Image (cartoon, rainbow, N blue to C red):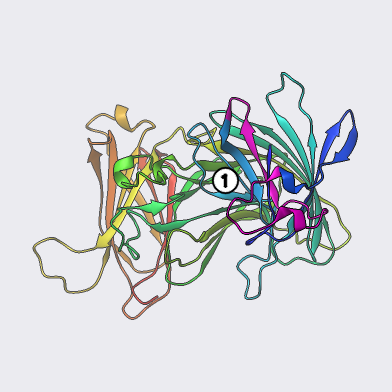
Amino acid sequence: MRFFHPGYLFESPVQMYEVVDGQAQQLAYDPAMFDYGKSGVDGRKLPRDLGFAGFKLLFHTDPQRDLAAFLGASYFRAVGGEMQFGLSARALAVDTGLPRAEEFPQFTHFWFERPARDSGQLTVHALMDSPSVAGAYRFVIAPGAVQVMDVDAALYPRKAIERLGVAPLTSMYQTGENDRRKAYDWRPEIHDSDGLAMLSGSGEWIWRPLLNPEHLRFNSYADQSPRGFGLMQRDRNFENYQDDGVFYERRPSLWVEPKGDWGKGAVQLMELPTEDETFDNIVAFWNPAEPARPGEERLFSYRLHWGAHAPVEPAAARVIATRTGLGGVVGQPRKYFSWRFAIDFAGGDLPMLGRDVKVEPVIDSSGGEIELASARPLHAVNGYRVMFDLKPKAGSREPINLRVFLRADGRALSETWLYQWSPPGG
């Protein structure tokens, strides 16, 4: 373990303790722990009780590359076997996406249980605090090809919270195959995550590609007893990024696996416009239907999986690509505006379908007209491609919600693709 020095954006002191045989001993700040180099800072003149900004974990066989880091407010991030950082998690989100300032709770204290010599995990306890809520957390961290964190949270609201965000995930999406609004960079795609995956309480798999919208977008997907959700980086092909510096194809996905029954609520997704890749603009979390009230205790347990793939994946075909562009028929004059969608599905039973099986796209739209819909074999991926045009209502700028899946003989063959598209100017 190594500690981060306070400074720059991270000025709030965090107190650290080691727990051995049930006894906690504070790990005191000491400037001798740090190399100030050419920073111009004289550590000898700093307060002796300065504290730390956060900490990072390293594996005992590799003292150079971080496995996980807890730094800033209640943010933390980790890597899988690819040893590549990407998206982050938070302990809690408070009033995200409302027309007022969001509140960011902070970790103020950490307690580290010294692992047994042959242990493969580390237990970390944390105290979280903010004007609206206090919380006690326990993290059991197990590194590996997929790094697993078991999280137990006890929340104590001080006042009513309009939008409580449990197990919040934060990521970045600037441009990709389905959204070229900011495609001014030489690299084809720039994103830490390309979609929100959800496994509903009813067992339905849902894939929602991410966007870099012109204006803030907030979507809520109601559910009961969710089985899991996560911000995923499904596209793991270097050719689609061409970045040999930050390696977006290696960025981890992060899957949230609830423990117990979380009841009614919604997975909520906020997408913000961003100009460049240094700003996170995607947030996803679980919002319980029952509002948080002062004086109560709210308990949540879940497991976080950091790695290339989620621990569970659809048995049916998955969406592997979403592309959009101008609609219409090539070679024929366009008499009105329409927008083309091409969705590639692969896996599941698709490779085993006979030539005589009629595969149809099931397409629902909240507005506009669907035209030129088709589903045809795509041999390059051993799957199927759905294509259709969406003709928006003339003059309308309202976002249109789309829902698509593959079906044959009355049976669903794929997960459900969800999308929100705004006509130009919307």
x and y, in percent, of residue 124 in the image: 76, 38
Residue at the far right: name it. Answer: 23
x and y, in percent, of residue 14 in the image: 77, 52
Question: Is disc 1 placed on a helix, strand or loop?
Answer: strand
Q: Amino acid at mark 1?
A: Phe
Q: Is residue 34 magenta?
A: yes
Q: What secondary structure prevails in the magenta region?
A: loop
Q: Which residue is mark 1?
A: 229
Left or right? Give the position of 231 relative to 261: left
Quarter of the figure with the C terminus: bottom left
- Residue 28: quadrant of the picture: top right
Does residue 227 appear in the picture of this structure?
Answer: no
The part of the chain drawn in magenta is 33-62
Q: Is residue 38 magenta?
A: yes
The residue nearer to you, when weighing 38 against 223, is 38
Residue at the far bottom: name it. Answer: 395
Does residue 182 appear in the picture of this structure?
Answer: yes
Residue located 29% across and 48% down the image: 386
- Residue 355: quadrant of the picture: top left
Position of 334 relative to 210 (above/below): below
Position of 354 relative to 52 (above/below): above
